[in-house]
Amino acid sequence: MKQGKSAVKNRLGALIYKESLQIVRDPSAIFVAFVLPVILLLLFAFAVSLDVRKVPVGVVLSSDTPTAQSLAAAFSGSRYFTVLPMRHTQEAKAAIIASKIRGYVVIPADVETRLHIRNNDLLIQVIADGSQPNTANFVTAYAQGIASLWLAQHGQSTVSPVSVQPRFWFNAELESRRSLIPGSIAIIMTMIGTLLTALVVAREWERGTMEGLLSTPATITEILLGKLLPYFVLGMLATLGSALMAVFAFDVPLRGSWLVLMMLAAVFLIPALGQGLVISILAKNQFIAAQLAAFTGFLPAFMLSGFLFEIDSMPWPIRLITHIIPTRYFVEALQTVFLVGNVWSLLLTDMLAMLLIGALLFVLARAKCHKSLEG
C-alpha cells in the first residue's frame, strides 16, 4: 500500500515538473499570466468608468440681474458640469444637435419675479439629450439638485418639510473604480484560467504527445492533476499580483483579509480551470480551443457576471443563465471582500456555488477524457 502511494506521488510529481518546465519555456503562458493582467487592469482602471464628471451643458442666461447671475454661478461652480454660457435658446439647440453639450438650462429673464411671486411658474427649464439616457437622467437630476440647493441657500426652499440626507455605504465617494477593479480581477482570472488550460490538453493532442502520456502507468486523474496544478499556482500568483496592484496602485480599499481573498481565488480557479479543461479535451485543437475559451469563458463573464450590467435588470431567462456562470459568484465575492469585509454569510454561498460548478466540470472532463482513451 505504501509503495502504491509512493508510486502515485512520484508519477504526479514528475507530471507536475514536466508541465512546469513547459510553462517556463512557453513565453505566451508567462505573458497571459503576468503581463496581460497588468494591461487589462490598467485598461479597466483608466478607460472604463461609470462616473459622470464634467458633463458639458449650456446655461442660457437671458438677463444680467444679480439673481440670475447668482443662479448661473451655482451651475458653473458644480464639479459635475462644464458650463457653456449662452444668450439664446436657439444657440443651445444648435449646440445640443451638434453634440457639443448634453443638455441646457434656461434661466428666464423674469427669474426674480418668479422667485418672489411664487406662483406655479417654473423657476428654470432643463432640456437634456435623450440619445444618451443615463447622461440625460444625470443632467436633469443634478440640475434640479443645484437649483434646489440654491433656493435653500437663499431662504426660498420649496421642498417638503421632510429632510432627506443620503448616505452611501461601502463607497461613500461613489467612485465606480472601486467597484470595477475588483470585478475586473474576476474577469481577468476567468480569462487566464480558462484560456491557459484550454490549450493544455489540446496542445498534447495536436503535437501527438498525448498518446505517449496515456501509455504511461499514470492514470487519467493523475495526468489531469499534473497538468492543472502548475496552472493553479500560476493563477494564484496572478490573482495576488492583481490584488496588490488594485490596493496599492489604484487605492481600492481591502476591508476583508488577504487570506479570505486568496481562499476565494483558490475556490474560483476550480471551475475556471475545469472549464478550460473540458474545452481542451473536446476541441483537441489549440485554435478551436482558444476560440471556445473566449466564447464560453470571457464573453459570458464580461456580459452576464454583473461586472458591468446589473443582473437584476436583465430578463428572467438571462438571469437564470447567469447562475451557471462561476464568474458571477466571484465578482460578487470580490466586491464584498474588497468594499464590505469578510461577510461569511455571503462569501460561503458564493464559494459553495463555485465549488459545485467546478465539481460538475471536473466530472465532465474526467468522463470525456476516459472516452477519448477508449476511442
Image (cartoon, rainbow, N blue to C red):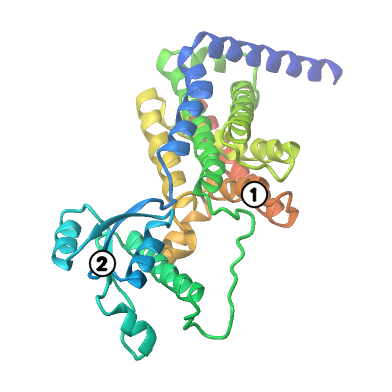
Identified at 57% across, 86% down, the residue is 161
Please tell me how crowded label 2 is: few (under 14), some (14-19), or many (20+) other residues with Cα within 10 Å. many
Residue 105 versus residue 21: which sits nearer the camera?
A: 105
Residue 348 horizontal/vertical position (percent):
71, 52
Residue 167 versus residue 3: which sits nearer the camera?
A: 167
As shown in the figure, which amino acid type bears the numbered disc 2? Leu
Residue 83 horizontal/vertical position (percent):
31, 55
Q: How many numbered marks does the figure carry?
A: 2
Query: Mark 2 touching mark 1, by CB under 8 A?
Result: no
Residue 367 versus residue 62: which sits nearer the camera?
A: 62
As shown in the figure, which amino acid type bears the numbered disc 1? Leu
Q: Is residue 291 above or below residue 174?
A: above
Q: Name the residue under label 1.
A: 339
Q: Mark 2 points at which residue?
A: 61
Mark 2 lies on a secondary structure that is strand
Residue 144 versus residue 73: which sits nearer the camera?
A: 73
**Hey, which quadrant is residue 131 in on the image?**
bottom left
Mark 2 → mark 1, Cα distance in angstroms: 43 Å
If the image is split into quadrants, where does the N terminus sit?
A: top right
Residue 124 horizontal/vertical position (percent):
32, 75
Identified at 51% across, 17% down, the residue is 30
Identified at 58% across, 83% down, the residue is 162
